[in-house]
Image (cartoon, helix red, strand yellow):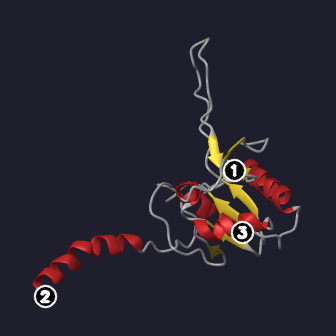
Amino acid sequence: VRHAAVLVLALYPLAVSAEVPEPAGYREDDYRAPVPATLNGATVVGPEEAYQLWQEGKVAFVDVLPRAPKPEKLPEGTIWHEKPRLSIPGALWLPNVGYGRIAEVTDAYFRAGLAKATKSDTDHPVLFVCLEDCWMSWNAAKRALSYGYTEVYWLPDGTDGWTFMDYPTEELTPEPGAQ
């Protein structure tokens, strides 16, 4: 019995950290941290369910991983290579739309990207992805719900979970107009 009590106490911090509550608003800092298991109004899916949705071809996939900006004042002649983004084939990459607060121009870019992905149909299913433990996709899915999208999916395991399952990937380029 004593060993069981020690085990329970040893595992208690893991159980507590796994229960991340949904914030009332958007997450505005520490974007790479444990995420909630839920998103009110959305359907949370794992990699297997996301793969099934992808195979069916009826859901628009939107990747919201931020894009690293090109450093300012690089010495002349410095070659700048963007880090490639490997993601779910056919996903639309809308970088930087998952921050807790976004500028009006980013909001317009996000709305335009969603309209492109869903053919301007707010009832068209849309799935948001980033990386594992990335609040960007949680924020983006929540924001899409606030825009009136009715069938929103969220993949909290992100492309990390997708690639762990050895599902296919392709290199994405950001949708033009990325901020």
Residue 158 placed where, x, y %? 57, 59
| Mark 2 crowdedness (10 Å alpha carbons): few <14, some 14-19, many ≥20 | few
> Which residue does the numbered mark 3 point to in the structure image?
53
Q: Earlier in the sequence, mark 2 or mark 1?
A: 2
SS of the residue under disc 3 = helix
Q: Residue reaching furthest top?
A: 77
Quarter of the image where one finds residue 15? bottom left
For the N terminus, which image quadrant? bottom left
Q: Are marks 3 and 1 in contact (CB under 8 Å)?
A: no
Does residue 125 appear left or right of residue 142 in this picture?
Answer: right
> Residue type at mark 2?
Val
Q: CA separation, marks 2 and 3?
A: 46 Å
Q: Earlier in the sequence, mark 3 or mark 1?
A: 3
Q: Nearer the viewer, mark 2 or mark 1?
A: 2
Q: Which mark is residue 103?
A: 1
Q: Is residue 142 visible?
A: no
> Residue type at mark 3?
Leu
Q: Residue at 79% of width from left, 41% of height from top?
A: 176
Residue 137 placed where, x, y %? 61, 60
